[in-house]
Amino acid sequence: MATLHTERNWKIKIYPDDHAPPHFHVQTPDGESLVQIEGLVVLGTGAEKKALKAALLWAKAHIADLKRVWDEQNRKD
């Protein structure tokens, strides 16, 4: 598992050998949301809304990093 960013009450993580589509997890104390990397589409809600909004702003500025880490963690050899 790769933790890409940690802020006050949220984290962005990418898990190895995870299911498609390429996505990341936004974890907060209240829950977790899945966000598709392409287009930053929220696939599942559970994270606190304010934290999710902040995570999406961070992700928008780091799309290339998210794609790179997804590819590193989810190689299909």
Image (spheres, rainbow, N blue to C red):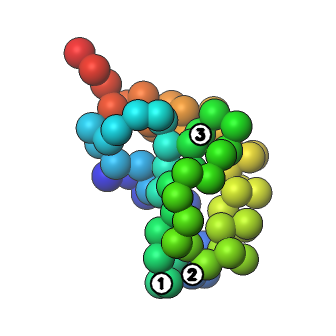
At horizontal 50% and vertical 43% (from top left) the residue drawn is 23
As shown in the figure, which amino acid type bears the numbered disc 1? Pro
Give x and y (percent) for residue 64. Answer: 63, 33
Q: Residue 72, position in %: x, y?
A: 38, 31
Residue at 32% x, 41% y is: 18
Q: Residue at the front extreme?
A: 44
Q: Reply above or below: 25 against 18.
A: below
Marks 1/2: CA–CA distance: 7 Å
Q: Nearer the viewer, mark 1 or mark 2?
A: 1
Residue 41 showing in the rendered view: yes
Q: Nearer the viewer, residue 30 or 13?
A: 30
Is the residue marked by circle 2 packed among few (<14), some (14-19), or many (20+) residues within 10 Å?
few
Residue 37 circle label: 3
| 14, above or below 55, in the image | above
36 and 44: which one is in front? 44
Q: Quadrant of residue 77?
A: top left
Q: Position of residue 19 (x, y in %)?
A: 34, 38
Q: Who is closer to the viewer here, 31 or 11?
A: 31
Determine whether the residue tagged by mark 3 lies in a helix, strand or loop. loop
Q: Secondary structure at mark 1?
A: loop
Corner quadrant of residue 74:
top left
- Residue identified by numbered label 1: 29
Look at the image and tell me whether residue 27 can be seen: no
Amino acid under label 2?
Answer: Asn
Mark 3 crowdedness (10 Å alpha carbons): few <14, some 14-19, many ≥20: some
Secondary structure, mark 2, is: loop
Label located before the other in sequence (1 or 2): 2
Q: Which residue is mark 2?
A: 9
In the image, 65: left or right of 61?
A: left
Give the amino acid type for the residue marked by disc 3 in the picture: Ile
Query: Mark 1 or mark 3, which has the lower sequence index?
Result: 1
Residue depicted at x 55% and y 73%: 47
